[in-house]
Image (cartoon, rainbow, N blue to C red):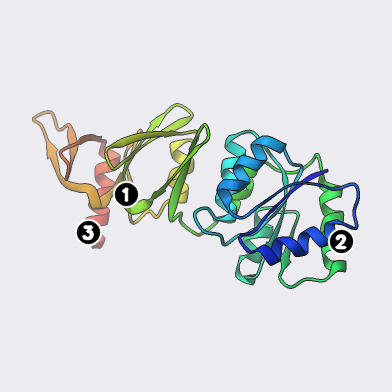
Amino acid sequence: MKALIVDDEDLARAVVREHLAAHPDIEIAAECANGFEALKAAAQHQPDLVFLDIQMPKLDGFEVLELLEADGRRPAVVFVTAYDQHALRAFEAQAVDYLLKPFSKERFDAALAKARAVQGSRPPAAQLAAASRQGRPLERVVVKDGPKVTVIPLDRLDWVQAQDDYVLLRTEGKNLLKQQTLASLESQLDPARFIRIHRSFLLNLDRLARIEQDAKEHREAVLRDGARLPVSRAGYQRLRELWEEA
């Protein structure tokens, strides 16, 4: 089995490396200090197993999983973290195991045994990432285009348009494509901030300036930057319900 060790702390990586030394059937393909390094190493080495920290700068562990799936790679994952509040989400995400720092050699070996047992039957990384966020809205969206990764904070996301199995994300005057359905992304966003105004459009309510209606009762959302998006009857009803609640 090829393994990646991903952690922003040198000492934490050293501990995992030391424990793996007792298992000659495990090859450490690379050690990574952040999520971007992990994605590059995964593309190069195609690991079977990732020892993955959760709280890291730039990209967290669950975002790394999502981007691995976008590239078609599905490694088994053992989370290694100092924070126990992620444990429930990790197990909901069907991670192989969850190692809470500091851990013993015996505990590490038990996690590795689980990884060997599930090799070949592990769930897709996108499934892991989606499950990990149950009941917890996204705070940002990550998009991978070849080797380039863009992180979009939600306060910079204007609107989203469905394009078959992709979504077009409008942010700061640019359009980015992400392989995900509109319904899937909608389920991960805060419904008080992002509203389905049309079967093909999600709108960040902070961008809405007004709603205009023509003589045939066709409605459009006019955004603060002048952009116009179609509003369906169902979408208009959702907006009215929000306004009434406010």
- Residue drawn where x is 35% and y is 33% of the image: 200
**Looking at the image, residue 237 lies above or below residue 45:** below
Residue 154 location in percent, x, y?
Answer: 37, 52
Q: Which residue lies furthest to the left in this view?
A: 215
Q: In this view, does 168 lie above or below 204?
A: above
Residue under pointer 3: 244
Q: Position of residue 51 (x, y in %)?
A: 72, 54
Of discs 2 and 3, which sits in the foreground? 2
Check disc 3 and report its element: helix, strand or loop.
helix
Can residue 205 be seen here? The reply is yes
Disc number placed over residue 195 in the picture, else none: none
Dividing the picture into quadrants, the one containing residue 10 is: bottom right
**Distance between the alpha carbons at the discs numbered 2 and 3:** 56 Å
Q: Which residue is drawn at 90% across and 46% down?
A: 25
Query: Crowdedness of circle 2 by 10 Å Cα count: few (<14), some, many (20+)?
Result: some
Q: Mark 1 points at which residue?
A: 156
Residue 182 position, x and y percent, is: 43, 37
Q: Could you say whether the residue bearing mark 1 is in a helix, strand or loop?
A: helix
The residue type indicated by label 2 comes to: Asp
* Secondary-structure class at tag 2: helix
Tag 3: residue type? Glu
Q: Name the residue under label 2.
A: 109
The kind of residue on which mark 1 rests is: Arg
Which is more toward the observer, 127 or 32? 32
Name which of mark 2 and mark 3 comes first in the sequence: 2
Q: Are marks 2 and 3 in contact (CB under 8 Å)?
A: no
